[in-house]
Image (cartoon, helix red, strand yellow):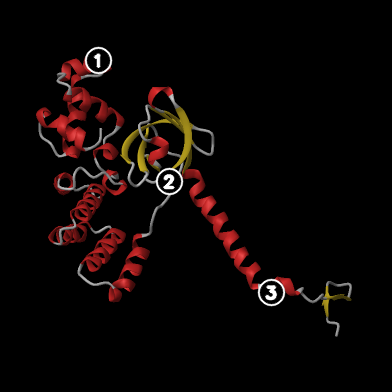
Amino acid sequence: MSSFQWTGDEGLPNAIAPQPDFLHNPDLTLLDAYSRAVVGAVETVGPAVLHLEIEGPRGRSGSGSGVVFTPDGFVLTNSHVAGGAKRIVATGAGGRSLRASLVGDDPDTDLAVLRLEGEPTGVARLGDARAVADRLEACGTRVDGALNGVRVHAARAMADGNAGALEDAADAFEQLGALLFAAETVNEAAIVHRRNGASRPATAAAQRSLRLVELCEGARTPSLMHGTGSAVLTKREREIATLASHGMSSREIASTLYVSVRTVDNHLQRAYEKLGVSSRTELAEALIRAGL
């Protein structure tokens, strides 16, 4: 039986053709949803994906890829790509290239972390704290022990930007013996404190995170490196702090960098506050702990 619809002012009927059966195929519907998901992922993550050109030991070269996961330029890649690299050049989708340095390498998990020497053009979000908290809470009835509950508390505190709740979660992780979780969580608390302009609590939380990391055989995870000294020090602060840690006086640093002694002292003071130290004698160790 034919069906018609009247359209326009012409008053002429247009036949509506029946839709082919293949358009109702559930496999095609699933494929269409998958295609949209892939396109969405590429549009979201694409600007954060980098092509890496690696110069390794003994002049060997290679290439690979990585993804920027923090606004301050940390890049996640594979250990087999960047491990032992002497020189790294990272190029984004727009063709802009930046030098990068290897700051973390774990061959056992085949993961490595790089640090860009410049601002990234895009950042990939690795997770949604609130969504993770909901999923963890849903698993709570099937998981024994108190650890999952603390994870839920930490995830919700992170989603809310609640530094006090993050420190409470870190306390609970430490009591359970989950020291790496505690270090990561209290580091997030330091980031929130710093974002809120609370420098003293931020310094205290950062120092606590470093102490906990020392109990974890010097573990280096993306979460620990996010917001630590290597993230919060400006390029000039890192430069002056490094020279000071090598024993140079403020006057010698000022002469080397063609700046005033007052400028050197001001940058050093800010570096002290961010690294949680109070003198040059503590500076070298703090820079090493911060991966600088």
Left or right of 69: which side holds 186?
A: left
Q: How busy is the neighbourhood of tag 2: few (under 14 within 10 Å), some, or many (20 plus)?
A: many
Left or right of 17: which side holds 237?
A: left
Residue that mark 1 sits on: 256
- Where disc 2 sits, the SS reads loop
Q: Identify the residue shown where x is 37% and y is 27%.
A: 86
- Residue 247 vertical position relative to residue 131 in the rendered view, above or below: above
Kind of residue indicated by mark 2: Val
Residue that mark 3 sits on: 24
Gap in Å between the C-alphas at discs 2 and 3?
A: 38 Å
Q: Quadrant of residue 275?
A: top left
Which mark is drawn over residue 123?
Answer: 2
Of tags 1 and 2, which is closer to the observer?
2
Gap in Å between the C-alphas at discs 1 and 3?
A: 73 Å
Kind of residue indicated by mark 3: His
Q: How busy is the neighbourhood of tag 1: few (under 14 within 10 Å), some, or many (20 plus)?
A: few
Q: Identify the residue shown where x is 22% and y is 37%.
A: 290
Q: Identify the residue shown where x is 11% and y is 32%.
A: 282
